[in-house]
Image (spheres, rainbow, N blue to C red):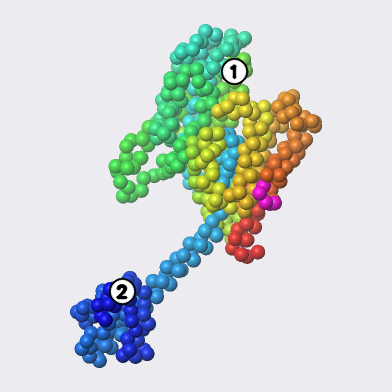
């Protein structure tokens, strides 16, 4: 009988056991350690409780039963701890609010994310000021070098394969105004150290993930240099914000970014910027220079005009970025970036919201990167879709035959149709309203690019048309009826965007309370 029980590896209740003995426990429970008398016998190792030895005395029986009770207490405690951990994880998932930022490239996703950080976690983004200063300096330096390249290029005799950094978009234009050659030669000489500054900052921020502007110009002399005139591109997941943080005690010298001599070049770059400050200001404010740029067709949108206007402040050695500077910093993400935001108590948040955790997924908006959106559809609370209203007279960089606004309509339709997003909050932001207003006032006809538009050519009527259009697409293509929250703003205007963020916060707060079963 004993051998058959061993082969079945099961427990048969003992007829001689008293009622105070513990019930059978799951075999193999971790944490039980049998008594010496039990281990001495020839009982099955995985049977619980163990069979009593043949000649067990009353004392040995009492010791064995006590050990069995203690083992069961340990086992029950482990079960309770595991269940408590599972419940904690469920509560934490409910406490997290996950948001997916969608839209085309240059629609303002990253700028909107910075607005969220400034509004609800200002101390956290202020701690990243060193990294943002490097980005802003690189934006400014690339703009200066771009301007010098444009103004000092050969005016009309560019040929394919020429090593000039001129772009194809500028190669067929000849300035009608004589170039200020003497000034240009002086500026090109005195500002030549900025070439080295550009290489230092690009290498420091992108860590070889993205080729520098100089490399891009050399590799593609007739390519679109304008697209990289001031922008900084960072590969998704690259922890560039931590690059300028002081090294902690005990950091591995072999892996520290500060142990390989990269901090000193950055400090030297700041000294060079300070030394070149007066010449940059003089070049940018020079009337002949501005006239030459207009003749070349270079607009303020082509360069970081905001930083150039304020170059005297930004190029100082002790410069500290303001929130407005950080908002206007140009930084493009190639891939997916995950950002964690912990709500801080302040002017726009209550004590109850303090510590609430938001997770933002900032994804690339180019056509080739949109396949990376789908994996995030199943685990988000809300989607914030940004549309650049100023894109009505622009085309996609990756496909010049496609209008940017019409592509936004198509992308919005695809997202609304997804059955994975049935229970997700939809938030639509019409961004860059300032540029839309300016272009309409310049006389650019909205109806020329959007054939279905038949109304007045002003920002009020165009905005109303866009809201009706996006709302109709959402209503007709959603798998189930749901509410759409629409807002219009200019993401670099903190005052206007602040009101939009508060309304979005209220929308997400309702979703959060519903998830916690409080409403």
Which residue shows up at 40% across the image and 35% down it? Answer: 207
Question: Magenta span covers which residues?
Answer: 478-482
Residue 141 among magenta residues? no
Q: Is residue 438 above or below residue 259?
A: above
Per the image, label 2 sits on a secondary structure element best described as: helix
Which residue shows up at 28% across the image and 73% down it? Answer: 7
Which residue shows up at 32% across the image and 37% down it? Answer: 260
Horizontal placement of 6 versus 350: left or right? left
Residue 233: where, in percent of width, then height? Answer: 48, 33
* In the foreground, 177 or 215: 215
Residue 106: where, in percent of width, then height? Answer: 58, 34
Which residue shows up at 76% across the image and 31% down it? Answer: 453
* In the foreground, 15 or 304: 15
Residue labelled with disc 1: 293
View extreme (right): residue: 455
The dominant secondary structure in magenta is loop
Residue 480 among magenta residues? yes
Q: Quadrant of residue 235?
A: top left
Residue labelled with disc 2: 8
* In the foreground, 83 or 391: 83
């Amino acid at each position: 009988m004993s051998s058959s029980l061993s082969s079945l590896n099961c427990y048969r209740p003992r007829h001689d056991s008293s009622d105070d003995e513990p019930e059978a426990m799951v075999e193999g429970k971790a944490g039980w350690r049998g008594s010496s008398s039990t281990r001495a016998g020839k009982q099955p190792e995985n049977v619980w409780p163990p069979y009593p030895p043949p000649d067990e005395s009353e004392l040995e029986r009492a010791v064995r039963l006590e050990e069995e009770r203690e083992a069961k207490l340990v086992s029950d405690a482990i079960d309770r701890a595991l269940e408590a951990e599972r419940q904690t994880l469920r509560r934490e998932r409910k406490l997290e609010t996950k948001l997916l930022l969608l839209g085309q490239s240059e629609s303002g996703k990253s700028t909107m994310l910075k607005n969220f950080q400034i509004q609800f976690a200002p101390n956290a983004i202020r701690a990243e000021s060193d990294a943002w200063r490097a980005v802003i300096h690189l934006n400014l330096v690339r703009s200066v070098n771009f301007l010098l390249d444009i103004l000092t290029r050969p005016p009309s005799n560019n040929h394919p394969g020429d090593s000039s950094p001129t772009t194809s978009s500028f190669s067929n234009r000849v300035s009608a105004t004589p170039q200020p050659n003497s000034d240009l030669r002086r500026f090109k000489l005195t500002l030549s150290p900025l070439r080295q500054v550009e290489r230092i900052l690009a290498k420091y921020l992108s860590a070889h993930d993205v080729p520098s502007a100089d490399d891009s110009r050399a590799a593609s002399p007739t390519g679109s240099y304008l697209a990289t005139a001031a922008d900084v591109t960072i590969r998704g997941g690259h922890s560039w914000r931590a690059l300028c943080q002081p090294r902690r005690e005990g950091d591995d010298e072999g892996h520290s970014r500060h142990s390989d001599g990269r901090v000193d070049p950055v400090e030297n770059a700041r000294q060079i910027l300070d030394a070149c400050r007066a010449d940059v200001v003089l070049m940018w404010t020079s009337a002949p220079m501005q006239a030459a740029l207009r003749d070349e067709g270079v607009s303020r949108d082509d360069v970081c005009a905001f930083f150039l206007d304020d170059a005297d402040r930004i190029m100082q050695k002790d410069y500290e970025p303001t929130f407005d500077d950080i908002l206007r910093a140009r930084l493009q993400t190639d891939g997916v970036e995950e950002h964690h935001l912990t709500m801080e108590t302040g002017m726009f948040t209550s004590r109850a919201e303090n510590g609430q955790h938001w997770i933002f997924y900032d994804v690339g908006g180019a056509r080739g990167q949109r396949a990376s959106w789908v994996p995030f559809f199943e685990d988000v609370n809300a989607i914030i879709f940004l549309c650049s209203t100023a894109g009505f007279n622009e085309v996609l960089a990756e496909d010049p035959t496609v209008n940017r606004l019409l592509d936004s309509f198509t992308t919005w339709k695809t997202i609304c149709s997804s059955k994975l997003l049935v229970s997700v909050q939809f938030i639509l932001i019409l961004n860059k309203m300032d540029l839309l207003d300016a272009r309409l006032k310049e006389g650019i006809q909205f109806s020329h690019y959007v054939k279905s538009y038949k109304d007045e050519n002003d920002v009020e009527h165009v905005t109303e048309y866009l809201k009706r259009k996006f709302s109709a697409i959402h209503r007709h293509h959603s798998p189930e009826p749901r509410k759409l929250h629409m807002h219009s703003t200019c993401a670099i205007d903190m005052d206007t965007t602040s009101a939009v963020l508060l309304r979005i916060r209220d929308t997400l707060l309702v979703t959060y309370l519903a998830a916690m079963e409080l409403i």
